[in-house]
Amino acid sequence: MAIKTRYWLMKSEPDVFSIDDLFDTPNQTEAWDGVRNYQARNMMRDEMQLGDLVFFYHSSCKPPGIVGIAEISKTAYPDHTAWDPGSPYYDPKSSSENPRWFMVDVKFYKKYPRMITLEELKQQPELNEMPLLKRGSRLSIMPVTQNQWEIINKLAE
DNA sequence: GCCAACGTTGGC
DNA sequence: GCCAACGTTGGC
């Protein structure tokens, strides 16, 4: 039996990797490397399923917001950038025998005709339970409920 | 560039 | 296992 699709939100700084970069990547698929937070890692490693849908969020930019949707195209596998001393994501405590960090592959799904800004998300009372909108929340990957997913998709119309 | 909030580290 | 110090995130 197929597992029910889950929904997520993943943050990326567009200067580093934007939704247009994903669009322009061969096969429109890229490894989501560099996650170095245990909570975020656990969600990728333990909960993300093939075909799950992801809000692509641009952070640390003006303005921040959701710019489109990606799809999980490969479930979690070790993040080898942690083993590369030349990588900004290098972590000497991770090894191929005992990997500490994981990544998934995401595939471009769609880009919204306009960004749904953080400001706009904040104005929706139905969304105030989203971790994204909670004071002090810094999670780079977070779950989205089906209800939240539908509300935001409607905003994009 | 500021800084609040949060996670991680490491001495004890 | 506590907790102070430090580093990072990310909106503003």
Image (cartoon, coloured by chain):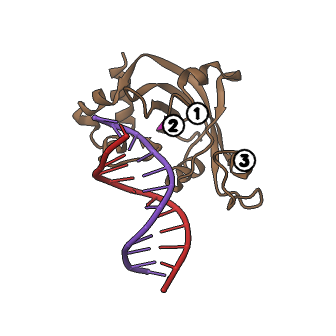
Chain colours: A brown, B red, C purple
Mark 3 or mark 2, earlier in chain: 2
Asked whether, in this view, residue A80 is left or right of residue A115, the answer is right
The numbered mark, 3 or 1, whose residue comes first in the sequence reads: 1
Q: Residue at x 42, y 27 (%)?
A: A66
Could you tell which of marks 1 and 2 lies nearer the N-terminus? Answer: 2
> In this figure, which residue is indicated by the disc labeled 1?
A51
Numbered circle sitting on residue A80? 3
- Residue type for callout 3: His
**In which chain is the residue bearing label 2?**
A
Q: Chain of mark 3?
A: A
Crowding near the residue tagged with mark 2, few <14, some 14–19, many ≥20 C-alpha atoms within 10 Å? few
**Quarter occupied by the C terminus of chain A:** top left
Determine the secondary structure under disc 1. loop
Q: Measure the alpha-carbon separation of dots 3 and 1.
A: 23 Å
- Residue A37: percent from the left, percent from the top? 53, 53
Find residue A57 and report its horizontal and vertical position in percent.
45, 31
Name the kind of residue labelled 1 in the image.
Gly
Are dots 1 and 2 in contact, CB under 8 Å?
yes
Q: Give the x, y percent position of residue C12.
A: 28, 35
Magenta residues? A8-12
Q: In the image, residue A83 lies at what x, y percent?
A: 73, 52
Q: CA distance from mark 1 to mark 2?
A: 7 Å
- For disc 2, the marked residue is A5
